[in-house]
Image (cartoon, rainbow, N blue to C red):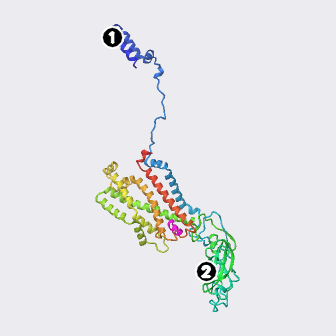
Amino acid sequence: MSTTSPTLSNATHSSNSNPGGSSMNSSVNRSFFDNPKQVLESLHGITSDDFDLLAQETGKVGLSRPSLSYWKDAWRRLKKNRQAIFSLYIVVGLVLFTLVGPSIWTTPPSLQTLGRVSEAPSLSIKTVRVLAELPAWQPTLAEGVPARPTAPVPAQDLKAPSQLKLMTEASTLAVRLSWDAVPGATGYRVYRGNYAPMQGSLGLPIATLDGGNIVSIQDTFNLVPGSQHYGVVALRDDEESPNFASLEVILPEAMSLPEALKIDPKAQAGQSLEMPLRPLGSDYLGRDLLARLMSGARVSLFIGFVAPFLSILIGILVGGISGYFGGKTDAWIMRFTDFVLALPFLLFMILFKVAFGAGPGEDGIGPMLLAMVALSWTGPARLTRGQVLQLRESEFVQASRLLGAKPMYLIIRHLLPNTLGVILVSLTFAIPSAIFTEAFLSFIGMGVVPPTPSWGSMCNDGIQTFLTHPHEFIFPALLISITVLAFNLLGDGLRDALDPKMRSVS
Protein backbone atom coordinates (compact mmCIF):
# COMPACT_ATOMS: atom_id res chain seq x y z
CA MET A 1 0.00 0.00 0.00
CA SER A 2 3.08 2.27 0.04
CA THR A 3 2.58 3.05 -3.68
CA THR A 4 -1.04 3.99 -3.14
CA SER A 5 -0.48 6.71 -0.57
CA PRO A 6 1.62 9.01 -2.79
CA THR A 7 -0.85 8.67 -5.61
CA LEU A 8 -3.79 9.54 -3.44
CA SER A 9 -1.89 12.36 -1.82
CA ASN A 10 -0.90 13.74 -5.23
CA ALA A 11 -4.46 13.59 -6.38
CA THR A 12 -5.53 15.44 -3.29
CA HIS A 13 -2.81 18.02 -3.72
CA SER A 14 -3.74 18.58 -7.35
CA SER A 15 -7.35 18.99 -6.46
CA ASN A 16 -6.53 21.57 -3.85
CA SER A 17 -4.24 23.45 -6.18
CA ASN A 18 -6.69 23.34 -9.07
CA PRO A 19 -10.16 24.19 -8.03
CA GLY A 20 -11.36 23.57 -11.53
CA GLY A 21 -10.48 19.86 -11.30
CA SER A 22 -13.01 19.02 -8.62
CA SER A 23 -15.33 17.41 -11.12
CA MET A 24 -12.58 15.04 -12.35
CA ASN A 25 -11.64 14.11 -8.77
CA SER A 26 -15.19 13.24 -7.87
CA SER A 27 -15.48 11.07 -10.98
CA VAL A 28 -12.35 9.09 -9.97
CA ASN A 29 -13.70 8.58 -6.46
CA ARG A 30 -17.02 7.38 -7.81
CA SER A 31 -15.30 4.90 -10.18
CA PHE A 32 -13.15 3.54 -7.28
CA PHE A 33 -16.11 2.83 -5.08
CA ASP A 34 -18.17 1.51 -7.98
CA ASN A 35 -15.49 -0.93 -9.24
CA PRO A 36 -12.43 -1.00 -6.92
CA LYS A 37 -10.93 -4.11 -8.49
CA GLN A 38 -10.70 -2.50 -11.93
CA VAL A 39 -9.23 0.71 -10.55
CA LEU A 40 -6.54 -1.06 -8.48
CA GLU A 41 -5.75 -3.39 -11.38
CA SER A 42 -5.21 -0.44 -13.70
CA LEU A 43 -3.07 1.45 -11.18
CA HIS A 44 -0.89 -1.32 -9.67
CA GLY A 45 -1.25 -4.48 -11.79
CA ILE A 46 -3.40 -6.35 -9.25
CA THR A 47 -5.58 -8.92 -10.96
CA SER A 48 -9.07 -9.98 -9.97
CA ASP A 49 -7.79 -13.47 -9.07
CA ASP A 50 -6.06 -11.93 -6.05
CA PHE A 51 -9.51 -11.23 -4.54
CA ASP A 52 -10.84 -14.82 -4.80
CA LEU A 53 -11.54 -16.74 -1.54
CA LEU A 54 -8.94 -19.29 -0.47
CA ALA A 55 -9.93 -22.95 -0.51
CA GLN A 56 -10.96 -24.25 2.93
CA GLU A 57 -8.35 -26.60 4.43
CA THR A 58 -9.58 -29.49 6.60
CA GLY A 59 -7.78 -31.95 8.88
CA LYS A 60 -5.14 -29.48 10.13
CA VAL A 61 -7.11 -28.19 13.08
CA GLY A 62 -8.24 -30.57 15.85
CA LEU A 63 -7.99 -31.43 19.50
CA SER A 64 -4.44 -32.03 20.68
CA ARG A 65 -5.75 -34.57 23.25
CA PRO A 66 -8.91 -36.71 23.02
CA SER A 67 -11.56 -36.18 25.66
CA LEU A 68 -11.34 -39.24 27.95
CA SER A 69 -12.76 -40.10 31.30
CA TYR A 70 -10.48 -40.67 34.27
CA TRP A 71 -10.67 -44.47 34.04
CA LYS A 72 -10.33 -44.59 30.24
CA ASP A 73 -7.26 -42.39 30.42
CA ALA A 74 -5.83 -44.59 33.19
CA TRP A 75 -6.40 -47.72 31.08
CA ARG A 76 -4.73 -46.02 28.10
CA ARG A 77 -1.63 -45.27 30.16
CA LEU A 78 -1.65 -48.72 31.78
CA LYS A 79 -1.55 -50.38 28.34
CA LYS A 80 1.67 -48.52 27.59
CA ASN A 81 3.34 -50.21 30.57
CA ARG A 82 4.50 -53.54 29.15
CA GLN A 83 5.54 -54.96 32.51
CA ALA A 84 2.15 -54.21 34.03
CA ILE A 85 0.25 -55.71 31.09
CA PHE A 86 2.43 -58.83 31.12
CA SER A 87 1.80 -59.14 34.87
CA LEU A 88 -1.92 -58.76 34.24
CA TYR A 89 -1.78 -61.67 31.80
CA ILE A 90 0.02 -63.75 34.44
CA VAL A 91 -2.66 -62.95 37.02
CA VAL A 92 -5.40 -63.93 34.58
CA GLY A 93 -3.51 -67.14 33.80
CA LEU A 94 -3.26 -67.95 37.52
CA VAL A 95 -7.00 -67.44 37.93
CA LEU A 96 -7.70 -69.75 34.98
CA PHE A 97 -5.17 -72.25 36.37
CA THR A 98 -7.08 -72.23 39.66
CA LEU A 99 -10.68 -72.25 38.41
CA VAL A 100 -10.56 -73.98 35.03
CA GLY A 101 -7.54 -76.23 35.58
CA PRO A 102 -9.24 -78.84 37.84
CA SER A 103 -11.97 -79.39 35.23
CA ILE A 104 -9.28 -80.21 32.64
CA TRP A 105 -6.82 -82.08 34.87
CA THR A 106 -9.22 -84.37 36.70
CA THR A 107 -6.72 -86.35 38.81
CA PRO A 108 -7.82 -86.15 42.47
CA PRO A 109 -5.22 -84.23 44.51
CA SER A 110 -5.59 -86.63 47.45
CA LEU A 111 -5.15 -89.86 45.45
CA GLN A 112 -2.13 -91.76 46.78
CA THR A 113 -0.24 -94.13 44.50
CA LEU A 114 2.36 -95.81 46.68
CA GLY A 115 4.10 -97.28 43.66
CA ARG A 116 4.86 -93.76 42.36
CA VAL A 117 6.29 -92.11 45.46
CA SER A 118 8.44 -89.02 44.73
CA GLU A 119 8.32 -89.65 41.00
CA ALA A 120 10.29 -87.17 38.90
CA PRO A 121 8.52 -84.97 36.31
CA SER A 122 7.96 -86.80 33.05
CA LEU A 123 5.87 -86.46 29.89
CA SER A 124 6.05 -90.16 29.00
CA ILE A 125 3.20 -92.57 29.72
CA LYS A 126 4.32 -95.43 31.97
CA THR A 127 2.93 -98.94 31.82
CA VAL A 128 2.92 -101.11 34.95
CA ARG A 129 1.90 -104.66 35.68
CA VAL A 130 -1.03 -105.29 37.97
CA LEU A 131 -0.36 -107.92 40.64
CA ALA A 132 -2.68 -109.51 43.12
CA GLU A 133 -2.28 -108.28 46.67
CA LEU A 134 0.28 -110.32 48.57
CA PRO A 135 -0.75 -112.06 51.78
CA ALA A 136 0.39 -110.58 55.06
CA TRP A 137 4.05 -111.12 55.71
CA GLN A 138 5.08 -113.78 58.22
CA PRO A 139 8.80 -114.60 58.62
CA THR A 140 9.79 -118.21 57.97
CA LEU A 141 11.30 -120.14 60.90
CA ALA A 142 13.60 -123.10 60.21
CA GLU A 143 12.38 -126.31 61.85
CA GLY A 144 14.66 -127.84 64.46
CA VAL A 145 17.04 -124.88 64.48
CA PRO A 146 17.35 -122.96 67.78
CA ALA A 147 17.34 -119.19 67.76
CA ARG A 148 20.45 -119.16 69.98
CA PRO A 149 22.72 -122.16 69.36
CA THR A 150 24.35 -123.61 72.47
CA ALA A 151 27.51 -124.78 70.72
CA PRO A 152 29.76 -121.79 70.14
CA VAL A 153 30.97 -121.41 66.54
CA PRO A 154 33.43 -118.65 65.69
CA ALA A 155 32.17 -116.14 63.10
CA GLN A 156 34.99 -116.94 60.68
CA ASP A 157 33.88 -120.59 60.62
CA LEU A 158 30.28 -119.84 59.71
CA LYS A 159 29.32 -120.94 56.23
CA ALA A 160 27.47 -118.85 53.64
CA PRO A 161 23.70 -119.29 53.58
CA SER A 162 22.68 -121.78 50.89
CA GLN A 163 19.61 -121.93 48.69
CA LEU A 164 19.10 -118.13 48.56
CA LYS A 165 16.02 -117.68 46.38
CA LEU A 166 12.82 -115.70 45.77
CA MET A 167 9.71 -116.78 47.64
CA THR A 168 7.28 -114.93 45.27
CA GLU A 169 7.50 -112.93 42.08
CA ALA A 170 9.73 -109.90 42.64
CA SER A 171 8.50 -106.42 41.72
CA THR A 172 8.69 -102.86 42.91
CA LEU A 173 5.97 -103.74 45.42
CA ALA A 174 8.02 -106.22 47.45
CA VAL A 175 10.92 -108.68 47.33
CA ARG A 176 10.66 -111.80 49.51
CA LEU A 177 13.78 -113.90 50.00
CA SER A 178 14.46 -117.17 51.83
CA TRP A 179 17.55 -119.33 52.49
CA ASP A 180 18.65 -122.35 54.46
CA ALA A 181 19.75 -121.95 58.06
CA VAL A 182 23.47 -121.85 58.85
CA PRO A 183 24.49 -124.07 61.78
CA GLY A 184 25.83 -122.07 64.70
CA ALA A 185 24.50 -118.70 63.46
CA THR A 186 22.74 -116.40 65.91
CA GLY A 187 21.29 -114.15 63.19
CA TYR A 188 21.66 -112.81 59.66
CA ARG A 189 22.31 -109.49 58.00
CA VAL A 190 20.84 -108.67 54.58
CA TYR A 191 22.41 -106.19 52.15
CA ARG A 192 21.13 -104.57 48.97
CA GLY A 193 23.01 -102.72 46.26
CA ASN A 194 23.08 -101.77 42.60
CA TYR A 195 26.23 -103.79 41.92
CA ALA A 196 27.29 -107.37 42.54
CA PRO A 197 28.49 -107.76 46.16
CA MET A 198 32.10 -108.55 46.96
CA GLN A 199 34.03 -109.10 50.13
CA GLY A 200 34.02 -105.88 52.15
CA SER A 201 31.44 -104.20 49.89
CA LEU A 202 28.11 -105.97 50.10
CA GLY A 203 25.94 -102.87 49.65
CA LEU A 204 23.49 -101.11 51.95
CA PRO A 205 22.39 -103.06 55.05
CA ILE A 206 18.59 -103.19 55.01
CA ALA A 207 17.87 -105.61 57.85
CA THR A 208 19.47 -107.49 60.75
CA LEU A 209 17.64 -110.62 61.89
CA ASP A 210 18.14 -111.60 65.55
CA GLY A 211 17.75 -115.36 65.59
CA GLY A 212 19.49 -118.20 63.81
CA ASN A 213 16.15 -119.80 62.90
CA ILE A 214 14.75 -116.75 61.00
CA VAL A 215 15.51 -117.57 57.35
CA SER A 216 13.38 -115.14 55.30
CA ILE A 217 12.93 -111.41 54.74
CA GLN A 218 10.61 -109.01 52.93
CA ASP A 219 12.03 -105.82 51.37
CA THR A 220 9.66 -102.98 50.47
CA PHE A 221 11.92 -99.98 51.04
CA ASN A 222 12.15 -97.57 48.09
CA LEU A 223 12.19 -100.20 45.36
CA VAL A 224 12.79 -98.90 41.85
CA PRO A 225 12.60 -100.71 38.51
CA GLY A 226 15.84 -102.35 37.41
CA SER A 227 18.44 -104.72 38.74
CA GLN A 228 19.12 -105.13 42.46
CA HIS A 229 21.75 -107.35 44.12
CA TYR A 230 21.02 -108.94 47.50
CA GLY A 231 23.59 -110.36 49.86
CA VAL A 232 23.02 -112.44 53.04
CA VAL A 233 25.70 -113.08 55.65
CA ALA A 234 25.49 -115.14 58.87
CA LEU A 235 26.20 -113.56 62.27
CA ARG A 236 27.66 -114.78 65.53
CA ASP A 237 26.79 -112.29 68.27
CA ASP A 238 26.69 -109.42 65.74
CA GLU A 239 30.03 -110.46 64.20
CA GLU A 240 29.77 -111.16 60.48
CA SER A 241 31.04 -114.24 58.74
CA PRO A 242 33.46 -113.70 55.83
CA ASN A 243 31.25 -115.95 53.69
CA PHE A 244 28.10 -114.63 52.07
CA ALA A 245 25.44 -115.58 49.54
CA SER A 246 24.23 -113.24 46.78
CA LEU A 247 21.33 -113.08 44.33
CA GLU A 248 20.54 -110.71 41.48
CA VAL A 249 16.87 -109.73 41.22
CA ILE A 250 15.21 -107.92 38.28
CA LEU A 251 12.40 -105.67 39.50
CA PRO A 252 9.62 -104.80 37.05
CA GLU A 253 7.40 -101.85 37.88
CA ALA A 254 4.16 -103.16 39.32
CA MET A 255 1.05 -102.04 41.16
CA SER A 256 -1.20 -103.91 43.52
CA LEU A 257 -4.73 -104.66 42.40
CA PRO A 258 -6.40 -102.45 45.06
CA GLU A 259 -4.30 -99.48 43.95
CA ALA A 260 -5.01 -100.21 40.28
CA LEU A 261 -8.76 -100.25 40.91
CA LYS A 262 -8.56 -96.63 42.08
CA ILE A 263 -7.26 -95.67 38.63
CA ASP A 264 -9.20 -98.11 36.46
CA PRO A 265 -12.25 -99.86 37.98
CA LYS A 266 -11.91 -102.58 35.33
CA ALA A 267 -8.30 -103.47 36.15
CA GLN A 268 -7.45 -107.15 36.69
CA ALA A 269 -4.45 -108.96 38.12
CA GLY A 270 -1.87 -109.96 35.52
CA GLN A 271 -2.69 -107.29 32.94
CA SER A 272 -0.75 -104.14 32.05
CA LEU A 273 -2.09 -100.76 33.05
CA GLU A 274 -1.20 -97.33 31.63
CA MET A 275 -0.47 -94.97 34.47
CA PRO A 276 -1.84 -91.40 34.42
CA LEU A 277 0.56 -88.78 33.15
CA ARG A 278 2.56 -86.94 35.82
CA PRO A 279 4.08 -83.89 34.08
CA LEU A 280 5.22 -82.35 37.37
CA GLY A 281 5.91 -85.61 39.19
CA SER A 282 4.48 -86.76 42.52
CA ASP A 283 5.14 -86.03 46.19
CA TYR A 284 6.38 -88.24 48.99
CA LEU A 285 2.99 -89.98 49.25
CA GLY A 286 2.59 -90.58 45.51
CA ARG A 287 0.05 -87.77 44.99
CA ASP A 288 -0.02 -85.90 41.68
CA LEU A 289 1.89 -82.64 42.14
CA LEU A 290 0.05 -80.76 39.38
CA ALA A 291 -3.35 -81.58 40.87
CA ARG A 292 -2.16 -80.52 44.32
CA LEU A 293 -0.78 -77.24 42.94
CA MET A 294 -4.19 -76.46 41.44
CA SER A 295 -5.94 -77.34 44.68
CA GLY A 296 -3.38 -75.39 46.70
CA ALA A 297 -3.84 -72.37 44.43
CA ARG A 298 -7.49 -72.22 45.47
CA VAL A 299 -6.51 -71.92 49.10
CA SER A 300 -3.63 -69.49 48.59
CA LEU A 301 -5.46 -67.20 46.16
CA PHE A 302 -8.68 -67.35 48.21
CA ILE A 303 -6.83 -66.06 51.25
CA GLY A 304 -4.81 -63.68 49.07
CA PHE A 305 -7.95 -62.05 47.61
CA VAL A 306 -10.52 -62.27 50.41
CA ALA A 307 -8.34 -61.17 53.33
CA PRO A 308 -7.09 -57.92 51.67
CA PHE A 309 -10.57 -57.14 50.32
CA LEU A 310 -12.21 -57.42 53.73
CA SER A 311 -9.41 -55.55 55.50
CA ILE A 312 -9.49 -52.71 52.95
CA LEU A 313 -13.29 -52.55 53.15
CA ILE A 314 -13.04 -52.07 56.93
CA GLY A 315 -10.15 -49.66 56.51
CA ILE A 316 -11.87 -47.30 54.07
CA LEU A 317 -14.99 -47.10 56.25
CA VAL A 318 -12.98 -46.37 59.40
CA GLY A 319 -10.67 -43.96 57.59
CA GLY A 320 -13.57 -42.20 55.86
CA ILE A 321 -15.43 -41.58 59.13
CA SER A 322 -12.24 -40.43 60.88
CA GLY A 323 -11.22 -38.05 58.11
CA TYR A 324 -14.66 -36.51 57.60
CA PHE A 325 -15.67 -35.81 61.20
CA GLY A 326 -12.21 -34.91 62.48
CA GLY A 327 -11.80 -33.56 65.99
CA LYS A 328 -12.09 -35.99 68.89
CA THR A 329 -13.57 -38.68 66.67
CA ASP A 330 -10.52 -38.58 64.46
CA ALA A 331 -8.17 -38.53 67.45
CA TRP A 332 -9.73 -41.56 69.18
CA ILE A 333 -9.95 -43.60 65.98
CA MET A 334 -6.38 -42.85 65.00
CA ARG A 335 -5.04 -43.71 68.47
CA PHE A 336 -6.79 -47.08 68.30
CA THR A 337 -5.37 -47.55 64.80
CA ASP A 338 -1.88 -46.78 66.09
CA PHE A 339 -2.37 -49.33 68.87
CA VAL A 340 -3.31 -52.09 66.40
CA LEU A 341 -0.50 -51.01 64.07
CA ALA A 342 2.03 -51.24 66.92
CA LEU A 343 1.23 -54.89 67.59
CA PRO A 344 3.93 -57.32 66.35
CA PHE A 345 2.15 -58.54 63.27
CA LEU A 346 3.63 -61.99 62.82
CA LEU A 347 3.81 -62.86 66.53
CA PHE A 348 0.27 -61.68 67.21
CA MET A 349 -1.02 -63.57 64.17
CA ILE A 350 0.60 -66.78 65.42
CA LEU A 351 -0.98 -66.27 68.86
CA PHE A 352 -4.32 -65.55 67.21
CA LYS A 353 -3.96 -68.69 65.14
CA VAL A 354 -3.18 -70.75 68.25
CA ALA A 355 -6.12 -69.29 70.20
CA PHE A 356 -8.59 -70.05 67.40
CA GLY A 357 -6.59 -72.95 65.98
CA ALA A 358 -7.95 -75.68 63.77
CA GLY A 359 -8.90 -78.95 65.38
CA PRO A 360 -8.42 -82.44 63.97
CA GLY A 361 -9.82 -82.72 60.45
CA GLU A 362 -10.20 -78.93 59.97
CA ASP A 363 -8.32 -77.00 57.34
CA GLY A 364 -7.39 -73.93 59.42
CA ILE A 365 -8.40 -71.42 56.72
CA GLY A 366 -11.04 -69.66 58.84
CA PRO A 367 -8.82 -68.73 61.81
CA MET A 368 -6.03 -67.55 59.52
CA LEU A 369 -8.43 -65.42 57.47
CA LEU A 370 -9.92 -63.87 60.62
CA ALA A 371 -6.48 -63.09 62.02
CA MET A 372 -5.27 -61.42 58.81
CA VAL A 373 -8.39 -59.25 58.51
CA ALA A 374 -8.23 -58.20 62.18
CA LEU A 375 -4.63 -56.99 61.85
CA SER A 376 -4.42 -55.64 58.27
CA TRP A 377 -7.04 -52.86 58.13
CA THR A 378 -4.88 -50.13 59.68
CA GLY A 379 -2.90 -49.26 56.55
CA PRO A 380 -5.94 -48.65 54.32
CA ALA A 381 -7.61 -46.69 57.16
CA ARG A 382 -4.71 -44.23 57.45
CA LEU A 383 -4.49 -43.92 53.67
CA THR A 384 -8.21 -43.23 53.28
CA ARG A 385 -8.19 -40.72 56.13
CA GLY A 386 -5.49 -38.68 54.40
CA GLN A 387 -7.44 -38.62 51.13
CA VAL A 388 -10.71 -37.63 52.83
CA LEU A 389 -9.00 -34.79 54.71
CA GLN A 390 -8.02 -33.32 51.33
CA LEU A 391 -11.44 -33.79 49.74
CA ARG A 392 -13.87 -32.80 52.50
CA GLU A 393 -13.41 -29.05 51.88
CA SER A 394 -13.84 -29.36 48.10
CA GLU A 395 -16.50 -27.36 46.28
CA PHE A 396 -18.65 -30.34 45.29
CA VAL A 397 -18.71 -31.53 48.91
CA GLN A 398 -19.67 -28.07 50.18
CA ALA A 399 -22.41 -27.82 47.54
CA SER A 400 -23.84 -31.20 48.51
CA ARG A 401 -23.71 -30.22 52.18
CA LEU A 402 -25.64 -27.01 51.45
CA LEU A 403 -28.29 -29.06 49.66
CA GLY A 404 -28.87 -31.01 52.86
CA ALA A 405 -26.80 -34.15 52.34
CA LYS A 406 -26.11 -36.11 55.49
CA PRO A 407 -22.56 -37.03 56.57
CA MET A 408 -22.81 -40.74 55.75
CA TYR A 409 -24.21 -39.92 52.32
CA LEU A 410 -21.32 -37.53 51.69
CA ILE A 411 -18.79 -40.12 52.81
CA ILE A 412 -20.21 -43.02 50.80
CA ARG A 413 -21.44 -41.11 47.74
CA HIS A 414 -18.78 -38.44 47.23
CA LEU A 415 -15.65 -38.92 49.31
CA LEU A 416 -14.93 -42.65 49.15
CA PRO A 417 -15.45 -43.02 45.37
CA ASN A 418 -12.86 -40.28 44.81
CA THR A 419 -10.31 -42.30 46.80
CA LEU A 420 -10.94 -45.44 44.75
CA GLY A 421 -7.78 -45.08 42.67
CA VAL A 422 -5.52 -45.01 45.72
CA ILE A 423 -7.45 -47.87 47.34
CA LEU A 424 -7.15 -50.00 44.20
CA VAL A 425 -3.38 -49.58 44.18
CA SER A 426 -3.26 -50.46 47.87
CA LEU A 427 -5.28 -53.61 47.17
CA THR A 428 -2.89 -54.82 44.48
CA PHE A 429 0.01 -54.50 46.92
CA ALA A 430 -1.93 -56.14 49.77
CA ILE A 431 -2.75 -59.29 47.75
CA PRO A 432 0.86 -60.53 47.33
CA SER A 433 1.56 -59.66 50.96
CA ALA A 434 -1.37 -61.84 52.08
CA ILE A 435 -0.30 -64.71 49.79
CA PHE A 436 3.25 -64.59 51.13
CA THR A 437 2.01 -64.42 54.75
CA GLU A 438 -0.17 -67.49 54.24
CA ALA A 439 2.69 -69.34 52.56
CA PHE A 440 5.07 -68.47 55.38
CA LEU A 441 2.67 -69.49 58.16
CA SER A 442 1.88 -72.75 56.36
CA PHE A 443 5.59 -73.35 55.81
CA ILE A 444 6.32 -73.13 59.55
CA GLY A 445 3.30 -75.28 60.36
CA MET A 446 1.03 -72.50 61.68
CA GLY A 447 -1.16 -72.12 58.61
CA VAL A 448 -3.27 -74.52 56.60
CA VAL A 449 -3.51 -77.91 58.27
CA PRO A 450 -2.73 -81.08 56.23
CA PRO A 451 -4.06 -82.83 54.26
CA THR A 452 -5.54 -79.61 52.80
CA PRO A 453 -2.92 -78.46 50.28
CA SER A 454 -1.59 -74.94 49.97
CA TRP A 455 1.55 -73.64 48.32
CA GLY A 456 3.16 -72.92 51.69
CA SER A 457 2.42 -76.35 53.17
CA MET A 458 3.66 -78.00 49.97
CA CYS A 459 6.96 -76.12 50.34
CA ASN A 460 7.13 -77.38 53.91
CA ASP A 461 6.70 -80.96 52.70
CA GLY A 462 9.11 -80.52 49.80
CA ILE A 463 11.97 -79.05 51.83
CA GLN A 464 12.31 -82.36 53.68
CA THR A 465 13.19 -84.21 50.44
CA PHE A 466 14.85 -81.31 48.62
CA LEU A 467 18.26 -82.98 48.25
CA THR A 468 16.87 -86.14 46.66
CA HIS A 469 13.64 -84.91 45.01
CA PRO A 470 13.93 -81.12 44.49
CA HIS A 471 10.85 -80.85 42.26
CA GLU A 472 8.56 -81.25 45.28
CA PHE A 473 9.84 -77.91 46.61
CA ILE A 474 10.71 -76.02 43.42
CA PHE A 475 7.27 -75.99 41.77
CA PRO A 476 5.21 -74.56 44.68
CA ALA A 477 7.99 -72.10 45.53
CA LEU A 478 8.10 -71.00 41.88
CA LEU A 479 4.35 -70.35 41.81
CA ILE A 480 4.57 -68.28 44.99
CA SER A 481 7.40 -66.19 43.53
CA ILE A 482 5.64 -65.65 40.18
CA THR A 483 2.36 -64.66 41.86
CA VAL A 484 3.96 -62.19 44.27
CA LEU A 485 6.11 -60.63 41.51
CA ALA A 486 3.16 -60.33 39.10
CA PHE A 487 0.96 -58.52 41.62
CA ASN A 488 3.78 -56.18 42.65
CA LEU A 489 4.50 -55.20 39.04
CA LEU A 490 0.78 -54.77 38.35
CA GLY A 491 0.50 -52.55 41.42
CA ASP A 492 3.37 -50.37 40.20
CA GLY A 493 1.65 -50.00 36.85
CA LEU A 494 -1.69 -49.10 38.42
CA ARG A 495 -0.03 -46.57 40.70
CA ASP A 496 1.47 -44.76 37.71
CA ALA A 497 -1.71 -45.04 35.61
CA LEU A 498 -4.03 -43.71 38.32
CA ASP A 499 -1.75 -40.84 39.35
CA PRO A 500 -3.27 -37.56 38.03
CA LYS A 501 0.21 -36.01 37.90
CA MET A 502 1.19 -38.54 35.23
CA ARG A 503 -1.45 -37.23 32.79
CA SER A 504 0.75 -34.36 31.68
CA VAL A 505 3.77 -36.65 31.37
CA SER A 506 2.04 -39.17 29.12
Taking the image as shown, residue 270 lies to the left or right of residue 398, namely right
Within 10 Å of disc 1 (Cα), the crowding (few <14, some 14-19, many 20+) is: few
- The question of residue 456 being in magenta is answered with yes
Which residues fall within the magenta stretch? 454-463
Decide if residue 79 is in sight here: yes
Q: Position of residue 388 (x, y in %)?
A: 35, 54
Decide if residue 409 is in sight here: no
Instruction: Name the quadrant of the N terminus.
Output: top left
Res 253 quadrant in image: bottom right
Residue assigned mark 1: 16
Q: Nearer the viewer, residue 484 or 51?
A: 484
Within 10 Å of disc 2 (Cα), the crowding (few <14, some 14-19, many 20+) is: some
Name of the residue lying farthest toward the top: 20
Res 200 quadrant in image: bottom right
Residue assigned mark 2: 207
Query: In whole angstroms, how far apart are the C-alphas of marks 2 and 1?
Result: 143 Å
Relative to 70, say whether 328 is above or below: below
Disc on the earlier residue, 2 or 1: 1
User: Which kind of residue does numbered mark 2 sit on?
Assistant: Ala
